[in-house]
Amino acid sequence: MIPDLLALRKQRHAHFFPNILMVVLAGSLLSYVPVRAYAGAAEKPTASQPSVMDLSLQSVMLFALNNNPEIKISEEHEEQAGYATQEALSVLYPQLDVTVKAAEEYNAPANFTSPDATIGKSDTGPSAEVILSANQLLYDGSTSREEVKRRETLQDSSKLQTELVREKIMITTIESYLEVYRLQNTLAEYDSFIARLRQIVKKVRLMADAGAESKAKLKYAESRLSFAEADYTNTRAAYNDALTDLEFLTGKLPRFQAKAPEVIDLIQIQLGEYKKMAETNNTSFLVNAKERQALEHELQGVNGRYMPTVNMIVEMSQSHDTGGEVGRDRSAVALLQLSYKIFDGYARDASKGRVNSQLQEIDYRRERTRRDIMQKLKLAYNQIIGLENEYRALLDETEANAELQALYKEQFELGEGDVIAMVEGEERLFTSRTRLYRIESDITNNSYSLLRQIGHLDREGFCENC
């Protein structure tokens, strides 16, 4: 069984990273396939238990992206940004107002239409007035148009912010899924490891009872078995925690067996090329560029406030007995209105200084973001190289441990082997096999981290309908 597993690992590692620029994920959404038992994770189903299914990273990602409230909140921010743009755009349309007044007036002196009315006589009576006005902004130094452009840019920025949230959820989901995958397989290795230790302890006990082996070696074997069983309990608790973390992102999941995802061979491309891709495609860089563009529009709008404002106003009114018993009166007026603020207490100068300072700040933020991204990019790239080298060395070590343990077992069965060497050989073999799963998970984690930094962690790579 051990040589078969090692051959499978070597075969997987030989084409562990197909040389294409996309994520290749195995498995269907919910394929009900019984798998071998995993202690504490995917136990062999009984008549009262549901079947264990294979659940790929692609399927888990679908659940995470569709059920996560953080993404829903960010999508609402997108919608709010769209309405804010519509608010700014409304200023460019004609503004229509109607005013209706009705009152009981007292006028002294009052106006009268009758020629017999006494001049200077007071009067009390009802009055009414209707005013319809239209105001069209013609020019304001492009302040309003620049505000529209600013909000449109912020609307684009809000979409990129949503992508940042999605990327964060995707990376967290990948990490949680890989931790579940690692611990499921570690628990399976514990099953086999503890079973083999129990066989060794059972045989050594029989030999000790017959006087063929010392009690000290029996006690040593029993102590190592107890330690393995205690460590198994801790690993199972860690698995339950990892599963809880994953279900926090996805919602309740069915009983499943995790599958190892495959990613591209990222070290086939030089680090310098990745830096160029990050400068162009990284979402944080794109957000920074949109925020700077929005500030530039705001600065143009502030400059426009130094210019006069021109409005065209059309007003029509009809009144009845306003100022006395004069009957109905109608009037209409069309005019151009120009206004210019001569002095505003240096408010425009202060606004211009504030925006210029914000532009400097956004440049500093970009530099800080660039350093952070390049650091993460280098770390992920170097980690992948180091982990792949360690993985290849560990494959050879695991194969050597398996062959050596087979020799120990043969000698032990012939009564020529040493109990301590047999137990320690099982421990070395178990440790190397479980380290393989850890390194596999670390390579995949760092690969997805690198993809995120260069802007290629795309949700469509997991599910088209997310």
Image (cartoon, rainbow, N blue to C red):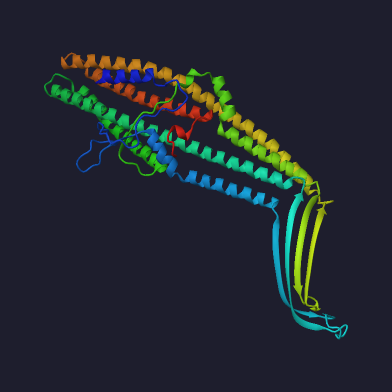
Q: Residue at x 77, y 58 (%)?
A: 313
Q: Nearer the viewer, residue 194 or 165?
A: 165
x then y, percent, for residue 405: 25, 17
Instruction: Measuring from the top left, give residue 227's x and y in whole percent.
Output: 28, 30
**148 relative to 12 in the view: left or right:** right
* Residue drawn at the location 18% of the way across and 21% of the way down: 214
The total number of labels drawn is 0
Q: Nearer the viewer, residue 370 or 456?
A: 456
Residue 387 x, y percent position in the rendering: 43, 21
Q: Is residue 354 visible?
A: no
Residue that sits furthest to the left in the current view: 210
Q: Residue at x 70, y 55 (%)?
A: 94
Up-down relation of residue 17 to residue 335 (above or below): above
Question: Would you place residue 166 above or below residue 84 in this image?
Answer: above
* Residue 295 point in image, percent of width and height: 68, 40
Between residue 166 and residue 115, name the one nearer to us.
115
Residue 160 appears left or right of 42: right
Q: Is residue 328 above or below residue 427?
A: below
Name the residue at the right extreme.
119
Quarter occupied by the N terminus: top left
- Can residue 99 be seen here? The reply is yes
User: Considering the image in quadrants, where does the C terminus appear?
Assistant: top left
Question: Residue 432 sits in which quadrant?
Answer: top left
Q: Is residue 417 above or below residue 202?
A: above
